Image (cartoon, helix red, strand yellow):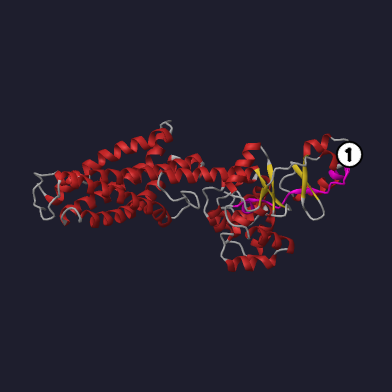
Amino acid sequence: IMLEENDTAGLAEFCRALYPPIAADVMDDMSVDDVFKVLSQGTPHDRAEILVYFPLPVQEEIAKCFSVELLAEIIEEMPPDDRADLLERFDKTLVENLLPLMTPAHRSDIRQLLSYPEGTAGSIMTTEYSSLPANLTVDEALKRLRKQAVDKETIYYIYITDEAQHLIGNVSLRRLLLAPEGTKLGDIIERDVISVRVNDDQEVVAREMNRYGFLAIPVVDSQNRLVGIVTHDDAADVLQEEATEDAHLAAAVAPLDDSYLDTPVMILLWKRGIWLVILLGASFLTAAVLNVFEGPTSKHSDAASLSSKGWMLLFIPLVLASGGNTGSQSATLVIRAMALDEKRGVQSSIAGLIAWKELRIGALLGLTLGSTTLVAARLLVGWQRAFVVSLTVFLVVICGTVVGGLLPVGLRKLGVDPALMSNPLIAALSDMLGVVIYYNVATLVLGG
Protein backbone atom coordinates (compact mmCIF):
# COMPACT_ATOMS: atom_id res chain seq x y z
CA ILE A 1 0.00 0.00 0.00
CA MET A 2 2.83 2.41 0.87
CA LEU A 3 4.39 1.74 -2.53
CA GLU A 4 1.10 2.34 -4.34
CA GLU A 5 0.55 5.59 -2.44
CA ASN A 6 4.21 6.60 -2.76
CA ASP A 7 4.35 7.03 1.02
CA THR A 8 8.07 7.88 1.29
CA ALA A 9 7.86 8.65 5.01
CA GLY A 10 6.20 5.30 5.71
CA LEU A 11 8.78 3.42 3.63
CA ALA A 12 11.61 5.19 5.45
CA GLU A 13 10.06 4.20 8.79
CA PHE A 14 9.66 0.63 7.52
CA CYS A 15 13.39 0.47 6.77
CA ARG A 16 14.35 2.07 10.07
CA ALA A 17 11.99 0.46 12.58
CA LEU A 18 11.55 -3.12 11.38
CA TYR A 19 14.06 -5.78 12.39
CA PRO A 20 16.22 -6.27 9.24
CA PRO A 21 15.60 -10.05 8.77
CA ILE A 22 11.85 -9.47 9.10
CA ALA A 23 11.98 -6.55 6.66
CA ALA A 24 13.77 -8.80 4.14
CA ASP A 25 11.15 -11.53 4.71
CA VAL A 26 8.31 -9.08 4.09
CA MET A 27 9.89 -8.12 0.76
CA ASP A 28 10.75 -11.71 -0.18
CA ASP A 29 8.03 -12.02 -2.83
CA MET A 30 8.41 -8.49 -4.19
CA SER A 31 10.08 -7.67 -7.49
CA VAL A 32 13.62 -6.30 -7.48
CA ASP A 33 12.30 -2.92 -8.66
CA ASP A 34 9.88 -2.70 -5.71
CA VAL A 35 12.56 -3.71 -3.22
CA PHE A 36 14.79 -1.01 -4.68
CA LYS A 37 12.01 1.57 -4.26
CA VAL A 38 11.60 0.60 -0.60
CA LEU A 39 15.32 0.60 0.20
CA SER A 40 15.79 3.91 -1.59
CA GLN A 41 13.91 5.59 1.25
CA GLY A 42 16.21 4.24 3.95
CA THR A 43 19.61 5.44 5.08
CA PRO A 44 22.75 3.68 3.77
CA HIS A 45 22.98 1.89 7.13
CA ASP A 46 19.35 0.69 6.93
CA ARG A 47 19.82 -0.46 3.34
CA ALA A 48 22.97 -2.42 4.20
CA GLU A 49 21.38 -4.10 7.22
CA ILE A 50 18.38 -5.30 5.22
CA LEU A 51 20.26 -6.16 2.03
CA VAL A 52 22.49 -8.81 3.64
CA TYR A 53 19.43 -10.95 4.50
CA PHE A 54 18.55 -11.49 0.84
CA PRO A 55 20.16 -14.38 -1.09
CA LEU A 56 23.36 -13.32 -2.83
CA PRO A 57 21.91 -13.45 -6.38
CA VAL A 58 19.07 -11.15 -5.24
CA GLN A 59 21.53 -8.88 -3.41
CA GLU A 60 23.43 -8.51 -6.66
CA GLU A 61 20.32 -7.56 -8.63
CA ILE A 62 19.19 -5.04 -6.01
CA ALA A 63 22.65 -3.53 -5.61
CA LYS A 64 22.97 -2.86 -9.32
CA CYS A 65 19.81 -0.73 -9.22
CA PHE A 66 21.66 1.91 -7.17
CA SER A 67 24.04 4.45 -8.59
CA VAL A 68 27.73 3.74 -8.08
CA GLU A 69 27.94 6.50 -5.45
CA LEU A 70 25.01 5.18 -3.40
CA LEU A 71 26.18 1.59 -3.78
CA ALA A 72 29.59 2.53 -2.39
CA GLU A 73 27.91 4.03 0.70
CA ILE A 74 25.84 0.87 1.22
CA ILE A 75 28.83 -1.46 0.85
CA GLU A 76 30.81 0.54 3.39
CA GLU A 77 28.02 -0.08 5.92
CA MET A 78 27.95 -3.86 5.34
CA PRO A 79 29.89 -6.31 7.53
CA PRO A 80 33.32 -7.02 5.95
CA ASP A 81 32.63 -10.69 5.11
CA ASP A 82 29.21 -9.92 3.60
CA ARG A 83 30.47 -7.11 1.41
CA ALA A 84 33.36 -9.28 0.22
CA ASP A 85 30.88 -12.02 -0.79
CA LEU A 86 28.81 -9.48 -2.71
CA LEU A 87 31.77 -7.79 -4.41
CA GLU A 88 33.04 -11.18 -5.60
CA ARG A 89 29.91 -11.43 -7.75
CA PHE A 90 30.49 -8.07 -9.46
CA ASP A 91 32.63 -7.73 -12.55
CA LYS A 92 36.08 -6.24 -12.02
CA THR A 93 35.19 -2.96 -13.73
CA LEU A 94 32.37 -2.22 -11.28
CA VAL A 95 34.57 -3.12 -8.29
CA GLU A 96 37.32 -0.82 -9.53
CA ASN A 97 34.77 1.98 -9.94
CA LEU A 98 33.46 1.46 -6.41
CA LEU A 99 36.76 1.30 -4.52
CA PRO A 100 37.88 4.93 -5.11
CA LEU A 101 34.59 6.11 -3.61
CA MET A 102 35.33 4.39 -0.28
CA THR A 103 37.59 5.38 2.57
CA PRO A 104 41.20 4.11 2.44
CA ALA A 105 40.54 1.83 5.42
CA HIS A 106 37.58 0.18 3.72
CA ARG A 107 39.49 -0.13 0.43
CA SER A 108 42.37 -1.85 2.16
CA ASP A 109 40.05 -4.19 4.04
CA ILE A 110 38.14 -5.14 0.89
CA ARG A 111 41.30 -5.82 -1.12
CA GLN A 112 42.63 -7.98 1.69
CA LEU A 113 39.48 -10.10 1.98
CA LEU A 114 39.11 -10.48 -1.79
CA SER A 115 42.70 -11.73 -2.01
CA TYR A 116 41.98 -14.95 -0.10
CA PRO A 117 41.01 -18.04 -2.11
CA GLU A 118 37.37 -19.09 -2.01
CA GLY A 119 36.64 -21.81 0.54
CA THR A 120 39.36 -20.74 2.99
CA ALA A 121 39.13 -19.24 6.47
CA GLY A 122 40.21 -15.89 5.03
CA SER A 123 37.27 -15.81 2.63
CA ILE A 124 34.65 -16.14 5.41
CA MET A 125 36.31 -14.19 8.23
CA THR A 126 35.44 -10.68 9.38
CA THR A 127 37.97 -8.05 10.36
CA GLU A 128 35.58 -6.48 12.90
CA TYR A 129 36.98 -7.95 16.10
CA SER A 130 38.03 -6.48 19.45
CA SER A 131 41.70 -6.54 20.38
CA LEU A 132 43.59 -4.98 23.28
CA PRO A 133 47.19 -4.92 24.57
CA ALA A 134 48.06 -7.08 27.58
CA ASN A 135 49.31 -4.21 29.78
CA LEU A 136 45.87 -2.63 30.31
CA THR A 137 43.94 -2.96 33.54
CA VAL A 138 40.41 -4.34 33.52
CA ASP A 139 38.76 -0.94 33.97
CA GLU A 140 40.90 0.55 31.17
CA ALA A 141 40.00 -2.39 28.94
CA LEU A 142 36.27 -1.91 29.55
CA LYS A 143 36.51 1.79 28.66
CA ARG A 144 38.19 0.94 25.36
CA LEU A 145 35.68 -1.79 24.64
CA ARG A 146 32.78 0.64 25.01
CA LYS A 147 34.30 2.70 22.20
CA GLN A 148 35.16 -0.33 20.04
CA ALA A 149 31.83 -2.15 20.43
CA VAL A 150 29.99 0.26 18.13
CA ASP A 151 31.95 -0.88 15.08
CA LYS A 152 32.61 -4.53 15.97
CA GLU A 153 30.59 -7.52 14.87
CA THR A 154 31.09 -9.31 18.17
CA ILE A 155 32.80 -8.69 21.52
CA TYR A 156 32.16 -12.09 23.11
CA TYR A 157 35.90 -12.63 23.03
CA ILE A 158 38.60 -9.98 23.33
CA TYR A 159 41.87 -10.89 21.67
CA ILE A 160 45.15 -9.81 23.26
CA THR A 161 47.91 -8.84 20.84
CA ASP A 162 51.35 -7.26 20.99
CA GLU A 163 52.50 -4.20 19.03
CA ALA A 164 53.13 -6.30 15.91
CA GLN A 165 49.59 -7.76 16.11
CA HIS A 166 50.83 -11.22 17.13
CA LEU A 167 48.12 -13.16 18.97
CA ILE A 168 49.09 -13.63 22.63
CA GLY A 169 45.83 -14.83 24.14
CA ASN A 170 42.17 -14.04 24.63
CA VAL A 171 39.69 -13.31 27.39
CA SER A 172 35.92 -13.68 27.39
CA LEU A 173 33.73 -10.68 28.09
CA ARG A 174 32.23 -12.53 31.05
CA ARG A 175 35.62 -13.10 32.65
CA LEU A 176 36.56 -9.48 32.03
CA LEU A 177 33.40 -8.21 33.75
CA LEU A 178 33.93 -10.46 36.78
CA ALA A 179 37.61 -9.57 37.27
CA PRO A 180 38.66 -6.91 39.85
CA GLU A 181 39.12 -3.47 38.26
CA GLY A 182 42.84 -3.13 38.92
CA THR A 183 43.76 -6.52 37.48
CA LYS A 184 46.06 -6.55 34.47
CA LEU A 185 44.72 -8.29 31.36
CA GLY A 186 47.94 -10.28 31.16
CA ASP A 187 47.00 -11.97 34.45
CA ILE A 188 43.56 -13.22 33.39
CA ILE A 189 43.95 -14.12 29.72
CA GLU A 190 43.98 -17.61 28.22
CA ARG A 191 47.33 -18.00 26.52
CA ASP A 192 46.77 -21.39 24.87
CA VAL A 193 44.55 -19.98 22.17
CA ILE A 194 42.99 -22.31 19.62
CA SER A 195 43.24 -20.54 16.28
CA VAL A 196 43.14 -21.36 12.57
CA ARG A 197 45.35 -20.30 9.69
CA VAL A 198 44.05 -17.92 7.06
CA ASN A 199 44.41 -20.54 4.31
CA ASP A 200 42.77 -23.41 6.24
CA ASP A 201 39.73 -24.99 4.56
CA GLN A 202 36.50 -23.37 5.69
CA GLU A 203 34.91 -26.72 6.54
CA VAL A 204 37.80 -27.56 8.86
CA VAL A 205 37.35 -24.19 10.56
CA ALA A 206 33.60 -24.71 10.99
CA ARG A 207 34.07 -28.19 12.44
CA GLU A 208 36.73 -26.90 14.82
CA MET A 209 34.31 -24.27 16.10
CA ASN A 210 31.54 -26.83 16.43
CA ARG A 211 33.86 -29.22 18.28
CA TYR A 212 34.80 -26.65 20.94
CA GLY A 213 31.50 -24.76 21.01
CA PHE A 214 33.15 -21.44 20.18
CA LEU A 215 31.16 -18.33 19.31
CA ALA A 216 34.17 -17.09 17.33
CA ILE A 217 37.63 -18.34 16.44
CA PRO A 218 40.70 -16.20 15.64
CA VAL A 219 42.33 -16.38 12.22
CA VAL A 220 46.10 -15.85 12.02
CA ASP A 221 48.63 -15.64 9.21
CA SER A 222 51.82 -17.68 8.85
CA GLN A 223 53.55 -15.45 11.44
CA ASN A 224 50.76 -15.82 14.02
CA ARG A 225 49.49 -12.28 13.46
CA LEU A 226 45.79 -11.83 14.06
CA VAL A 227 44.04 -10.92 10.79
CA GLY A 228 40.38 -11.65 11.58
CA ILE A 229 37.84 -13.92 13.22
CA VAL A 230 35.24 -16.41 11.99
CA THR A 231 31.95 -16.05 13.85
CA HIS A 232 29.47 -18.80 14.71
CA ASP A 233 26.88 -17.69 12.14
CA ASP A 234 29.41 -17.91 9.31
CA ALA A 235 30.53 -21.32 10.56
CA ALA A 236 26.89 -22.49 10.58
CA ASP A 237 26.52 -21.26 6.99
CA VAL A 238 29.60 -23.24 5.97
CA LEU A 239 28.32 -26.46 7.55
CA GLN A 240 24.97 -25.89 5.85
CA GLU A 241 26.67 -25.35 2.50
CA GLU A 242 28.75 -28.49 2.93
CA ALA A 243 25.68 -30.55 3.89
CA THR A 244 23.86 -29.22 0.82
CA GLU A 245 26.85 -30.03 -1.38
CA ASP A 246 26.99 -33.59 0.00
CA ALA A 247 23.23 -34.04 -0.58
CA HIS A 248 23.54 -32.83 -4.16
CA LEU A 249 26.55 -35.03 -4.89
CA ALA A 250 24.71 -38.05 -3.46
CA ALA A 251 21.94 -37.39 -5.99
CA ALA A 252 24.43 -37.01 -8.88
CA VAL A 253 24.13 -33.22 -9.07
CA ALA A 254 27.24 -31.05 -9.29
CA PRO A 255 27.17 -28.59 -6.32
CA LEU A 256 25.21 -25.41 -7.03
CA ASP A 257 26.71 -21.99 -6.39
CA ASP A 258 23.30 -20.53 -5.52
CA SER A 259 20.05 -21.95 -4.20
CA TYR A 260 17.95 -24.26 -6.37
CA LEU A 261 15.26 -21.64 -7.00
CA ASP A 262 17.83 -18.94 -7.83
CA THR A 263 19.87 -21.12 -10.21
CA PRO A 264 19.09 -20.56 -13.93
CA VAL A 265 17.75 -23.46 -15.96
CA MET A 266 20.81 -23.70 -18.22
CA ILE A 267 23.18 -23.96 -15.25
CA LEU A 268 20.99 -26.66 -13.70
CA LEU A 269 21.00 -28.46 -17.05
CA TRP A 270 24.81 -28.60 -17.02
CA LYS A 271 25.11 -29.48 -13.31
CA ARG A 272 22.64 -32.35 -13.68
CA GLY A 273 23.21 -33.41 -17.26
CA ILE A 274 26.91 -34.19 -17.02
CA TRP A 275 26.27 -36.85 -14.37
CA LEU A 276 23.18 -38.23 -16.10
CA VAL A 277 25.16 -38.81 -19.29
CA ILE A 278 27.79 -40.71 -17.30
CA LEU A 279 25.09 -42.83 -15.62
CA LEU A 280 23.47 -43.39 -19.02
CA GLY A 281 26.78 -44.77 -20.25
CA ALA A 282 26.84 -47.22 -17.34
CA SER A 283 23.27 -48.30 -18.14
CA PHE A 284 24.20 -48.85 -21.78
CA LEU A 285 27.02 -51.13 -20.68
CA THR A 286 24.37 -53.19 -18.86
CA ALA A 287 22.42 -53.45 -22.11
CA ALA A 288 25.60 -54.54 -23.91
CA VAL A 289 26.24 -57.25 -21.30
CA LEU A 290 22.66 -58.50 -21.60
CA ASN A 291 23.07 -58.61 -25.36
CA VAL A 292 26.11 -60.82 -24.99
CA PHE A 293 24.26 -63.33 -22.83
CA GLU A 294 20.96 -63.22 -24.71
CA GLY A 295 22.61 -63.39 -28.13
CA PRO A 296 23.12 -60.58 -30.66
CA THR A 297 20.00 -58.84 -31.92
CA SER A 298 19.72 -58.35 -35.64
CA LYS A 299 20.16 -54.75 -36.68
CA HIS A 300 18.01 -55.38 -39.73
CA SER A 301 14.94 -56.91 -38.04
CA ASP A 302 12.89 -53.73 -37.60
CA ALA A 303 9.88 -55.54 -38.97
CA ALA A 304 6.47 -54.17 -38.12
CA SER A 305 5.79 -56.97 -35.72
CA LEU A 306 6.38 -57.15 -32.00
CA SER A 307 5.97 -60.89 -31.81
CA SER A 308 9.57 -61.05 -30.64
CA LYS A 309 10.23 -58.52 -27.89
CA GLY A 310 13.53 -59.90 -26.68
CA TRP A 311 15.47 -56.87 -27.89
CA MET A 312 13.32 -54.60 -25.68
CA LEU A 313 14.51 -56.35 -22.54
CA LEU A 314 18.05 -55.16 -23.24
CA PHE A 315 17.10 -51.52 -22.65
CA ILE A 316 14.65 -51.82 -19.75
CA PRO A 317 17.41 -51.14 -17.14
CA LEU A 318 18.49 -48.07 -19.16
CA VAL A 319 14.93 -46.74 -19.43
CA LEU A 320 14.15 -47.28 -15.76
CA ALA A 321 17.48 -45.79 -14.61
CA SER A 322 16.94 -42.66 -16.74
CA GLY A 323 13.60 -41.89 -15.10
CA GLY A 324 14.74 -42.84 -11.62
CA ASN A 325 17.97 -40.83 -11.73
CA THR A 326 16.34 -37.64 -13.03
CA GLY A 327 13.47 -37.97 -10.56
CA SER A 328 15.86 -38.46 -7.66
CA GLN A 329 17.82 -35.38 -8.71
CA SER A 330 14.68 -33.24 -8.78
CA ALA A 331 13.43 -34.58 -5.46
CA THR A 332 16.78 -34.03 -3.74
CA LEU A 333 17.01 -30.44 -4.97
CA VAL A 334 13.48 -29.59 -3.83
CA ILE A 335 13.80 -31.40 -0.49
CA ARG A 336 17.05 -29.59 0.25
CA ALA A 337 15.39 -26.31 -0.70
CA MET A 338 12.66 -27.13 1.84
CA ALA A 339 15.24 -27.92 4.50
CA LEU A 340 16.92 -24.56 3.92
CA ASP A 341 13.54 -22.82 3.88
CA GLU A 342 14.08 -21.27 0.47
CA LYS A 343 11.12 -19.07 -0.37
CA ARG A 344 9.49 -19.93 2.98
CA GLY A 345 9.93 -23.66 2.66
CA VAL A 346 8.87 -24.14 -0.95
CA GLN A 347 5.18 -24.16 -0.18
CA SER A 348 2.50 -25.39 -2.56
CA SER A 349 1.88 -21.77 -3.60
CA ILE A 350 4.94 -22.02 -5.83
CA ALA A 351 4.36 -25.60 -6.96
CA GLY A 352 3.60 -24.17 -10.38
CA LEU A 353 6.99 -22.47 -10.45
CA ILE A 354 8.72 -25.75 -9.61
CA ALA A 355 6.67 -27.67 -12.21
CA TRP A 356 7.50 -25.14 -14.94
CA LYS A 357 11.18 -25.14 -14.05
CA GLU A 358 11.38 -28.94 -13.95
CA LEU A 359 9.39 -29.27 -17.18
CA ARG A 360 11.91 -27.09 -19.02
CA ILE A 361 14.86 -28.88 -17.45
CA GLY A 362 13.24 -32.26 -18.17
CA ALA A 363 12.71 -31.40 -21.84
CA LEU A 364 16.33 -30.28 -22.24
CA LEU A 365 17.70 -33.26 -20.31
CA GLY A 366 15.39 -35.54 -22.28
CA LEU A 367 16.71 -34.19 -25.58
CA THR A 368 20.30 -34.63 -24.40
CA LEU A 369 19.87 -38.16 -23.06
CA GLY A 370 17.51 -39.18 -25.86
CA SER A 371 19.99 -38.10 -28.54
CA THR A 372 22.82 -39.91 -26.78
CA THR A 373 20.65 -43.02 -26.44
CA LEU A 374 19.75 -42.97 -30.14
CA VAL A 375 23.41 -43.15 -31.14
CA ALA A 376 24.33 -45.71 -28.48
CA ALA A 377 21.33 -48.00 -29.04
CA ARG A 378 22.07 -48.08 -32.77
CA LEU A 379 25.19 -50.07 -31.92
CA LEU A 380 22.97 -52.95 -30.74
CA VAL A 381 19.74 -52.62 -32.77
CA GLY A 382 18.45 -50.97 -35.93
CA TRP A 383 17.47 -47.32 -36.29
CA GLN A 384 13.74 -47.87 -35.71
CA ARG A 385 14.28 -49.75 -32.48
CA ALA A 386 16.94 -47.29 -31.38
CA PHE A 387 14.41 -44.49 -31.99
CA VAL A 388 11.89 -46.31 -29.77
CA VAL A 389 14.40 -46.40 -26.92
CA SER A 390 15.45 -42.79 -27.53
CA LEU A 391 11.88 -41.45 -27.56
CA THR A 392 11.08 -43.47 -24.44
CA VAL A 393 14.06 -41.98 -22.60
CA PHE A 394 12.96 -38.49 -23.64
CA LEU A 395 9.43 -38.99 -22.25
CA VAL A 396 10.55 -40.84 -19.12
CA VAL A 397 13.04 -38.11 -18.22
CA ILE A 398 10.36 -35.41 -18.50
CA CYS A 399 7.98 -37.45 -16.31
CA GLY A 400 10.77 -38.13 -13.82
CA THR A 401 11.77 -34.48 -13.40
CA VAL A 402 8.22 -33.19 -13.00
CA VAL A 403 7.11 -35.95 -10.62
CA GLY A 404 10.37 -35.74 -8.68
CA GLY A 405 9.99 -31.98 -8.28
CA LEU A 406 6.33 -31.97 -7.23
CA LEU A 407 6.17 -35.12 -5.11
CA PRO A 408 8.03 -33.62 -2.09
CA VAL A 409 5.72 -30.59 -2.14
CA GLY A 410 2.66 -32.85 -2.18
CA LEU A 411 4.01 -35.08 0.60
CA ARG A 412 4.74 -32.09 2.82
CA LYS A 413 1.21 -30.81 2.26
CA LEU A 414 -0.09 -34.21 3.42
CA GLY A 415 2.06 -34.00 6.54
CA VAL A 416 4.52 -36.70 5.44
CA ASP A 417 8.27 -36.18 5.65
CA PRO A 418 9.41 -35.76 2.02
CA ALA A 419 12.94 -36.93 2.80
CA LEU A 420 11.55 -40.26 4.05
CA MET A 421 9.14 -41.03 1.22
CA SER A 422 10.17 -39.18 -1.95
CA ASN A 423 12.95 -41.33 -3.41
CA PRO A 424 11.27 -44.73 -2.77
CA LEU A 425 8.03 -43.44 -4.30
CA ILE A 426 9.86 -41.92 -7.26
CA ALA A 427 11.66 -45.23 -7.89
CA ALA A 428 8.36 -47.13 -7.87
CA LEU A 429 6.51 -44.57 -10.01
CA SER A 430 9.33 -44.15 -12.54
CA ASP A 431 9.65 -47.92 -12.95
CA MET A 432 5.93 -48.29 -13.58
CA LEU A 433 5.70 -45.29 -15.92
CA GLY A 434 8.89 -46.29 -17.69
CA VAL A 435 7.60 -49.75 -18.63
CA VAL A 436 4.18 -48.42 -19.69
CA ILE A 437 5.71 -45.66 -21.83
CA TYR A 438 8.31 -48.01 -23.32
CA TYR A 439 5.86 -50.61 -24.61
CA ASN A 440 3.36 -48.02 -25.78
CA VAL A 441 6.02 -46.12 -27.73
CA ALA A 442 7.19 -49.39 -29.29
CA THR A 443 3.63 -50.21 -30.33
CA LEU A 444 3.10 -46.76 -31.87
CA VAL A 445 6.41 -46.66 -33.73
CA LEU A 446 6.76 -50.28 -34.83
CA GLY A 447 3.07 -51.20 -35.03
CA GLY A 448 1.53 -54.48 -34.01
Q: Nearer the viewer, residue 220 or 140?
A: 220
Q: Position of residue 436 (x, y in %)?
A: 21, 41
The residue that appears at 24% across and 57% down in the rendered structure is 375
Does residue 241 lie above or below 87 as drawn? above
The single residue placed furthest to the right in the displayed view is 182
The residue that appears at 85% across and 39% down in the rendered structure is 187
Q: Position of residue 93 (x, y in %)?
A: 59, 69
Q: Nearer the viewer, residue 167 or 13?
A: 167
Query: What residue did someone put label 1 on?
Result: 183
Q: Secondary structure at mark 1?
A: loop
The three-letter amino acid code for the residue at tag 1 is Thr
Q: Is residue 278 left or right of residue 131?
A: left
The single residue placed furthest to the top in the displayed view is 415
Q: Position of residue 425 (x, y in %)?
A: 34, 35
Quarter where residue 104 is shown: bottom right
The residue that appears at 40% across and 57% down in the rendered structure is 266
Q: Position of residue 66 (x, y in %)?
A: 61, 62
Q: Could you tell me if residue 9 is visible in this image?
A: no
Q: Is residue 185 magenta?
A: no
Q: Could you tell me if residue 215 is visible in this image?
A: yes
Q: Is residue 439 left or right of residue 418?
A: left
Q: Over which residues does the magenta segment extend?
A: 120-142
Q: Is residue 187 left or right of residue 369?
A: right
Quarter where residue 407 is shown: top left
Total numbered badges shown on the rendered structure: 1
